[in-house]
Image: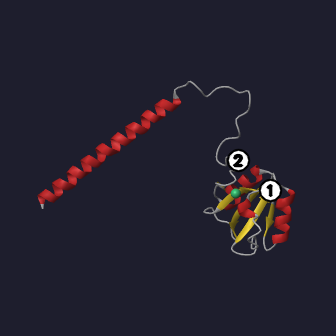
Amino acid sequence: MTTFVDDDPGYLEWAAAHPDGYVVNCGRTPGPDYLKLHRASCNFIRSSKRSNWTTGDYIKVCSVDLGDLRRWASGEVGGDLQPCQSCSPAPVKGNLPIKKGVRGGTGTGGGPSRLGTTKNVVEFLAALMAVIGGIVAFIQWLK
Ligand SMILES: [Zn+2]
C-alpha cells in the first residue's frame, strides 16, 4: 500500500504502472465518510484536466491488493470503502467473488420469503401509522 501526499507525479506514475491496481481517494486526514475506491484506470482520478491529485484537500492511497485497502479502511480509518459508480471496482462489502463451479444458493426460497417479510413490514408500518394518526386525532378531539 502506498500513500501519495503532495506527490502528483509519483501518483500518476503509479497509476500508469498499475492499471489493474486500486486507488482510494480520501481526505488529507482520511475519514470514514469519504473513502472512494477507484480502479487505477478510472478517468475520474487521472484525467489530465486536473493536476491537484494529491496536493489539495485530497490524497490517494494506492495498492494492487484490494484486501490491503479494505483492511486499511476498516482498521486504520474505521470506515468502508465506497466504490466509484463510474469504474465499478470489485464489490467492497462482504463476500469474495463467487467461485466458478460452485453451485448452490438457488432454490431455497430465500428470495420470496425475504420479499414476504418486507411486505409484512410495510403493512405493519402502514397499520402503525394509521394507529398513530388515530391517537393524534383523538388527542386533538380531547382539546
Ligand atoms: Zn472511478
**Residue 91 x %, y %:** 67, 46
The residue wearing badge 1 is 63
Q: Residues within 10 Å of mark 2 (few under 14, many from 20)?
A: some
Relative to 135, is 109 above or below?
A: above
Q: How many marks?
A: 2
**Residue 27 x %, y %:** 68, 69
Determine the residue positioned at 73% across, 68% down.
Answer: 59
The amino acid pointed to by label 1 is Ser
Q: CA distance from mark 1 to mark 2?
A: 14 Å
Question: Which quadrant holds residue 42?
Answer: bottom right
Relative to 39, is 3 above or below?
A: below
Query: 20 or 105: which is nearer to us?
Result: 20
Ligand number 1: quarter of image: bottom right
Q: Is residue 2 left or right of residue 138?
A: right
Q: Residue furthest front?
A: 49
Residue 133 shows which numbered tag?
A: none
The quadrant of the picture occupied by the N terminus is bottom right
The residue wearing badge 2 is 90
**Residue 76 x %, y %:** 70, 60
Question: Which quadrant holds residue 22?
Answer: bottom right
Question: Which quadrant holds residue 12?
Answer: bottom right
- Camera-near label (1 vs 2) is 2
Query: 93 or 42: which is nearer to us?
Result: 42
**Residue 89 x %, y %:** 70, 50
Relative to 87, is 28 above or below?
A: below
- Secondary structure beneath dot 2 equals loop
Q: Residues within 10 Å of mark 1 (few under 14, many from 20)?
A: many
Determine the residue positioned at 47% across, 31% down.
Answer: 113
Of labels 1 and 2, earlier in sequence is 1
The amino acid pointed to by label 2 is Ala
Determine the residue positioned at 81% across, 51% down.
Answer: 20
- Secondary structure beneath dot 1 equals strand
